[in-house]
Amino acid sequence: MNRSLTLGYSPCPNDTFIFYALTHGRIPLSGVSVIPRLEDVETLNRLALEAALDLTKISYHALGHLREKYVLLRSGGALGRGCGPLVVAPQATHMDALRHKKIAIPGELTTANLLLQLYGTGYEQTVILPFHEIMGAVTEGHVDAGVIIHESRFTYAEHGLHQILDLGQWWEKSSGLPIPLGGILARRDLGTPLIHELETAIRQSVDDAFAHPELSRDYIRSHAQELSDEVTAQHISLYVNPFSRDLGEEGELAVRTLLSRAEERHIIPPCKLSLFV
């Protein structure tokens, strides 16, 4: 009997690029079919808190609250350099001037918010908005600043906004490590053999995406209709890299360091379970 597993990921180009092969029958799975569910990352974070998905993309901030029920996979995630969230504002200023001001974030459990809180204290007056509404809220004066992610980092200057801080750059300088943005989780109760098979399948899906980029083009475009082909290509090249295929030792160290710093600040609870299977 074929077993159906739910797989949550975002409609952003990096995710549709990575998971196209897996969800369109190009990667063989023994007795398992994968049913995709596309949602924004904060919705995926919330669904994972309810253990509603078998496999899912999540923010690494959310992972800190999910380790009892999920394990992290080494393939399919977003981790790298030069790809972190940006703090933007209507006028050039500095981070100290934004303490106790209204700052829009793309979700409480996003890595963007975690990095903001790890950067320093006084940034707790956050306003949660869908990521694509943050720049508008800043330009219209509804908030004093915003933490932007995804393709917004390519377009914020067109909205007359100024970069105040590159949180990813800050993280890289303070840790010496790449920035963990989003990872792929599997429910612990799927069992080790199936989890290993799924991890391998996702790695094969990444390989297939790089080998045959033309196959996923229409699928990517259908979920990113508001993006130009140029921005879509920039998005994929920035967020899909060798770490997407396998975290490796450096990627694993980056994840463990991020979680450790968050635990030290009591932003996430401690967990003694193994991070991986």
Image: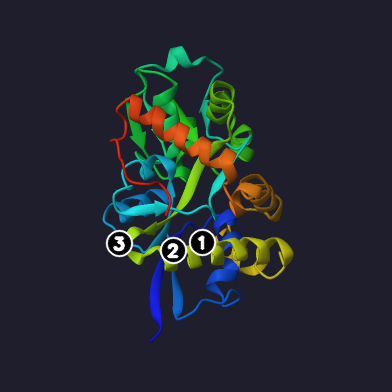
Q: Amino acid at mark 3?
A: Ala
**Residue 37 horizontal/vertical position (percent):** 42, 66
Residue 78, relative to residue 158: is it above or below? below
User: What is the quadrant of residue 44 in the picture?
Assistant: bottom left
Q: Badge 3, how many Cα within 10 Å: few under 14, some, many 20+?
A: some
Tell me the residue that label 3 is attached to. 52
Q: Secondary structure at mark 2?
A: helix
Residue 128 appears anywhere in the view: yes
120 displayed left or right of 222 = left
Q: Quadrant of the C terminus?
A: bottom left
Q: Quadrant of the N terminus?
A: bottom left
In 3D space, how far apart are the residues under numbered discs 3 and 2 (Cα atoms)? 17 Å
Are the two marked residues, 1 and 2, in contact with CB atoms closer than 8 angstroms? yes
Tell me the residue that label 2 is attached to. 195
Q: Amino acid at mark 2?
A: Ile
Q: Amino acid at mark 1?
A: Glu
The numbered mark, 3 or 2, whose residue comes first in the sequence reads 3
The numbered mark, 3 or 1, whose residue comes first in the sequence reads 3
Residue 241 appears anywhere in the view: no
Labels in figure, total: 3
Q: Which of 86 and 139 lies nearest the eye of the viewer?
A: 86
* Mark number, residue 251: none
